[in-house]
Amino acid sequence: MPVKIHVQLFFERTCQKCRQLVRVMVHDYGELTPEEADRAFGLHDFTVYPLRCPECGTEEFPMHIVGVDALKNAEIFRTRIGTADLPVVGGDTPYAVVRSLEEMAEYERGLAKLADLFKEKETEFWKSFTSWAAEDWPNRLKELSKIELSLGLSAVGKPAPPEMSAAAHRQHALKLRDDEICVFWRAANRHLIEKEFLFDPPDFWNTEAWAREYGRERVLWVLLNFPLPEKLERWRTEKLAPLIKKKSGALWERVRQLGQALDKQRRRAEELSRTVFDLRQEIACLQEKLSAEREERHKLLAEVGKLRQAETPAERDRAKLDRYKALVKELQEETKRLYSLLPETVSKESVTEEPQTEAVTELPDPRETLSGKIVAAFGFAREPWRDSDAQILWHHGDKWDAEAERLAKEADVLVVLTRFCSHEAMWAAKEFAADTGKPVGFARGGGAESVLLAAQNAFRTAIPPCRTGPVRPA
């Protein structure tokens, strides 16, 4: 009873991103004998489609078709898709050997005529084959295996014992008559013709392997003389080139060279198709990463927008004030730089004008308003002035130093004597007042009365500092 195998056919690829093996079954043939399986493989056409990786989700076309014996969980064969051994028909796929629908239709018409054409010319073929063998009968017998010799001798009614060697079988075959040679040769070569050349389509003829098994000269003659429809003739030339020896004549040498060039182009096309396949998978991976990065960017932008919307008016005012302070600091630095370029006398005698209304006749006595207050006056270096109502701490106003900082901290109000104070000290006093919320006034005169009046005006026009806490709705 012949051994049966449970044949299953799979598409297979290796994911370039995560190196996962992806395999999908495309057909289950059930339990068949090896010969039945060979016939069944040629009866079906399968659509090649992208396989999805279960790990990373990428989709790419399969690279191999694999036959598996499900009973033993063993591979029967593995063939690369899109090569000369397994071309792809039509479609935009990353394979090297792709036939158009028209080419495939022509090829199938040729295959359909092959069996009938051989049957029509079978007698003539065997007669020519036998005549060729009889011309050099001893050498032709050397290419026959022991099994072939045994089959031939049995066909002519002269079977040899199984234990007899192949050399002994050949000795018996050398004694055959001319009428027996034809029967012997046909029986000995039946497997080569019917199970190889007729069974396999011409594009699957493995002539190099057959030459090693059956003999180069015998396979070469069959290949040259085997009846083929015109639509399949191109494969005769293609399969002929590997069997031609070097230095076999100019014409044969040219055939061999053309065959080698065609084979080289096909191999290069297969390499390029593999490169394209790898690049497509790499591009798919990069596009996935780019998509993830874009999504992450959109999320971050959305979070930043939410944070900006959640910002309170007080926080926005504080940020605006910080920007203004930075601008004031830049102006102070520029003022220092410009003053350093002036002569010493001009720097000392610089005058700062500040348009302020000094005298307000309707105001009450400054001493009453400033009772118990400390006033820091910048512009004259004098002894502290005090009476029963207010105290004035004097600073020379030439520059903003540690003494000026100390006096400003002790005072309740700052007064700049605009005719006697430097620009540096004036801007520093303004900044200090803005930071601490203390009022600041400006006086043109240099006496205590002018200082007290400017301090009184500063208290009257002082703006309360900005709130930093959350603003409650009305």
Image: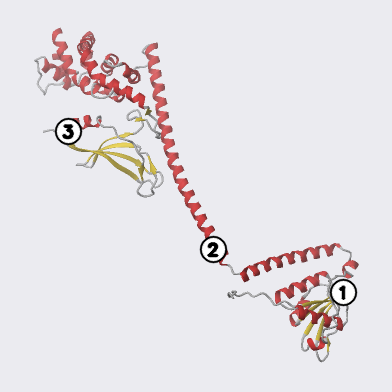
Could you tell me which secondary element the residue under label 2 belongs to? helix
- CA gap, disc 2 and disc 1: 52 Å
Q: Which residue is at 73% across, 78% downward?
A: 438
Tag 3 residue: 33
Pinpoint residue 390: horizontal percent, then vertical percent: 80, 87
Could you tell me which secondary element the residue under label 1 belongs to? loop
- CA gap, disc 1 and disc 3: 117 Å
Pinpoint residue 425: horizontal percent, then vertical percent: 80, 72
Label 3 sits on what residue type? Answer: Thr
Pinpoint residue 254: horizontal percent, then vertical percent: 40, 15
Label 2 sits on what residue type? Answer: Lys
Label 1 sits on what residue type? Answer: Phe
N-term mark: 2 or 1:
2
Rendering quarter of residue 82:
top left
Question: Which residue occupies the extreme right position in the image?
Answer: 345
Tag 1 residue: 420
Q: Which residue is at 33% across, 25% downward?
A: 104
Name the one closer to the observer, 414 or 124: 414
Question: Which residue occupies the extreme front position in the image?
Answer: 474
- CA gap, disc 2 and disc 3: 71 Å
Q: Nearer the viewer, mark 1 or mark 3?
A: 1
Rendering quarter of residue 209:
top left
The numbered dot on residue 306 is 2
Q: Which residue is at 36% across, 40% downward?
A: 50
Name the one closer to the observer, 445 or 69: 445
Question: Which residue occupies the extreme bottom position in the image?
Answer: 388
In what quadrant of the picture does the C terminus appear?
bottom right
